[in-house]
Image (cartoon, rainbow, N blue to C red):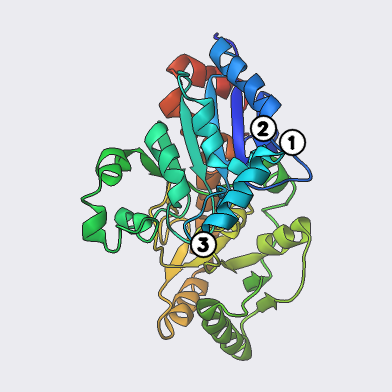
Amino acid sequence: MKRECRILELGAGSYFKENGFGRVDYYQIGKKSSEEPNLTFRQFLHLRRQLRSGRYDVVVASFFGVCGTPWHRGRGVVSNLFKMARCCMGRFYGFGPWIILWLLQGVEVPLVVVDRKDDPCVIPPQFFGLLKKCRAYYWRELPLKIENGFMYTDGRMEDTSAVRKTRIFCNHRHKIKPLSLGLNYDAVAKRVDFKCPKEIDVFFAGTSKGEMARESGLKILEELKQEGLAIEILTGQTLSRQVFLEICARSWLVYSPEGHGWDCFRHYEACAVGSVPLINYPRIHRHHPLIDQEHALYYGVEGSDLKRVIKTALADKDRLREMGVAARDFVLQHHTHEKLFDYILQPVMNPEDVAGWNATHTAF
């Protein structure tokens, strides 16, 4: 077996390192962190030497939120120069994605980008260099019409017909792949009795203020509650993960409308504890999607379609129980962090390396 894979992860929110993988070195760039090491110029030079010596097999650019650069078109020249000076005088991490491109200049180490930001569904212009350099660009909120993700990120891209003519779109769109948020198997599936009795018809916990789709959906849930259904709605409260998952496990349906992004941890957490998520129809490309009527239930936000879907589903609870089992199996097969890491690393590693990775990181 080949030596274990060594990953250098840089970004504004760790992904591999955050989920407990010991062969990952992570440095914060773009935004200052009080918990993770912020990359300094001295560390940058050290990492350049290590990359050239072959210490790392993969570089991962990991972002949960927009990671900026000191030069921004929306600011004045003086403001930009001031921020550049601050980066040069001790805030080297503030150069953001530029740092990754400088690190890899003249170095033959593959790069993958993991873009997990909630919203908006666009590739920020400061990420274009990463898209050009990387082997694969994993995008959580990948629009159904991919060219929409390039609009308004460059002054020349004012409509999709203009985007389709650009060199970056034509030459690099094939690298873009969907990614799910997934879940931590140890933190979810192993801690909850997913075979417990079902006592709640529909459960929802979360915020709704300003979210029109959620507000209209909650009105329908309230109407169903008045009609006698066992509806549990918890808003304005902060539940521990354990309590939240236990209530999900006791529910036939878990209402999981989109929030900042369409993809949501709640989709996979509900499945992992044997319940069926109730989700509005998707507006993004998905990785191993939950199938309607098989792993999840989908509804249209218009009119009373949500009420129709709920009543139809609750009329056959034996079928819902079967769907909950299928949903759990499906999520554990495709959407644990371990499975997603395998998926992310495949384009940059040989089969022997992936086999070694799998052997030392078994999801269940």
Q: Position of residue 102 (x, y in %)?
A: 52, 29
What residue is disc 3 on?
Answer: 261
Which residue type does callout 2 highlight?
Answer: Tyr
Q: Nearer the viewer, mark 3 or mark 1?
A: 1
Against 350, is 189 above or below?
below
| Residue 15 visible in this rendered orientation of the protein | no
- The residue depicted at 49 percent of the width and 25 percent of the height is 104
What residue is disc 1 on?
Answer: 37
Q: On residue 26, which mark appears?
A: 2
Q: Nearer the N terminus, badge 3 or badge 1?
A: 1
1 left or right, relative to 22: left
Against 41, is 184 above or below?
below
Which residue type does callout 3 highlight?
Answer: Gly
Q: Nearer the viewer, mark 2 or mark 1?
A: 1
User: How far is mark 3 from mark 1, CA to CA?
Assistant: 28 Å
Mark 1: which secondary structure?
loop
User: How far is mark 2 from mark 1, CA to CA?
Assistant: 8 Å
- The residue depicted at 57 percent of the width and 48 percent of the height is 70
Mark 2: which secondary structure?
strand
Picture quadrant of residue 37: top right
Mark 2 touches mark 1? (CB < 8 Å): yes
The answer to which of 94 and 201 lies nearer the viewer is 94
Against 127, is 147 above or below?
below
Q: Nearer the N terminus, badge 3 or badge 2?
A: 2
262 left or right, relative to 229: left
> For the residue carrying disc 3, how many other residues have a C-alpha within 10 Å: few (<14), some (14-19), or many (20+)?
some
> For the residue carrying disc 1, how many other residues have a C-alpha within 10 Å: few (<14), some (14-19), or many (20+)?
some
